[in-house]
Amino acid sequence: MKSVVAPFEPEDPPAPLGRLARHGVPERWQTVDRSAHAPHLVAVPTDDGEDWTAAALVTARPHTAYLKIVDVVGDVRAAVAAVVAHARGRGLAQVKWEGWTARPEDAAAVGFAPLRPPLAQAEDAAGPATGYVRWLHDGSVAEPPYYGQTTHFTCGAVTALVAQAHAGALPDAALDRRAELTLWRDATNHPACEPVGLGVAVRRAWPSSPVTVHLDTDRPVLLDHYPENEREWRALLQDTSRTEAERTGVPVDPRHLPLAAIRSAIGRREHVLLLVSLDGMQGFDVPHWVLCHGVVPGAVVIEDPWANASTGDTWVDAHLLPVADPALDTMSVLSADRFRGAVTIGPPRPHAPSSSSAHAEAP
């Protein structure tokens, strides 16, 4: 399909887009600064090339392997087909489509499947009620529930809860704010969750699930930005977590965890909670937990419990998000020590007490 790809500059839109305004170019194209997500237009030209019959506003987080359609004006199905071809030409894994104006019948007609709507989101989150996805490779990735963290500091707890819900160890109905804050309280290093403390908390909440912590440094982590007097007691808490890990049989593997091992773990139906920096995807170097739960050619599929509404980022971006292997490898090496922190959770062992009941009994 012939298409035109052009940058989207809200102050100076291309003339053919202006002529498509009769179809109702949404105001949301203009009201959010999407410049950090490379906004561009994929348009379908008329036969003479002088005008457009349709256009889609397309964005994506940096260092990822997907495109997101925000909206389409004009001939919807033709524009979406042009975006899919554009994504294939770039070797990407996936196209998503926010459901602001998308009709289910149009999405189905061009090969998109509906996404499960989020179970929760932060109060300042902005996003459509629905969304759609089309994978650009053979096979499919099993979809976990999407739960957006409701605080700025509970990403570690949320990734663990979503992992267990995806594994069938926790009912979706139990994935709520009480569970989020309860698990965070058990794992926190005030306010962050460091790898060993998170692994120990997961073991306590779900004793039937095998847990391994991967941390290739023996010093306390995630403390560099605190003054010295604030580091000391947090370091002591991390030392206590290591003692508790030894007492409860949670292994702490001191070797570097390579991306190939993360892929292998996912292939064994394990879930990998991975500590990353948000610098690559969001532009600020803040440590953050994501869930690695699927693989596609060249990319790992993650759940990110946080979306940056100020850049037009929504749960549709953060859910079923493919990140190319080299990019994920880079963003998951943290601080000057260049350490990697992760927690792997295996499928629940059969004939053991149910993790959902263990979780329900936690204080």
Image (cartoon, grey):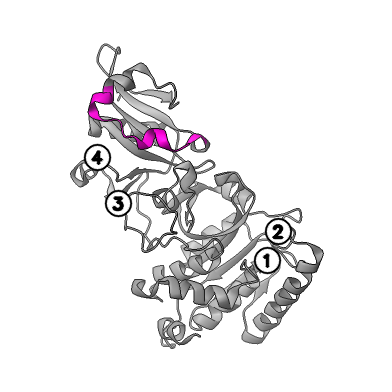
Q: Amino acid under label 4?
A: Val
Q: Amino acid under label 1?
A: Leu
Q: Distance between the residues labelled 2 and 4?
A: 43 Å
State yes or no: discs 2 and 4 in contact (Cβ < 8 Å): no
Identify the image quadrant of residue 6: top left
Whichever of labels 1 and 2 marks the residue nearer the N terminus, that label is: 1
Which mark lies nearer to you, 1 or 3? Answer: 3
Residue 88 x, y percent position in the rendering = 39, 35
Q: How far apart are marks 4 and 3 (CA)?
A: 16 Å
Q: How far apart are marks 1 and 3 (CA)?
A: 38 Å
Whichever of labels 1 and 3 marks the residue nearer the N terminus, that label is: 3
Residue under the point 44% across and 67% down? 162
Q: Residues within 10 Å of mark 3 (few under 14, many from 20)?
A: many
Report the side of 220 relative to 159 (left or right): right
Q: Residues within 10 Å of mark 1 (few under 14, many from 20)?
A: many
Disc 1 target residue: 215
Local secondary structure at mark 4: loop
State yes or no: discs 1 and 2 in contact (Cβ < 8 Å): yes
Residue 125 covered by magenta stretch: no
Residue under the point 52% across and 71% down? 345
Disc 3 target residue: 130
Q: Start and end of the magenta stretch? A: 20-35
Disc 4 target residue: 110
Q: In this view, does 212 lie above or below 129?
A: below
State yes or no: discs 1 and 3 in contact (Cβ < 8 Å): no
Q: How far apart are marks 1 and 4 (CA)?
A: 44 Å
Q: Amino acid under label 3?
A: Thr
Identify the image quadrant of residue 45: top left
Q: Amino acid under label 2?
A: Phe
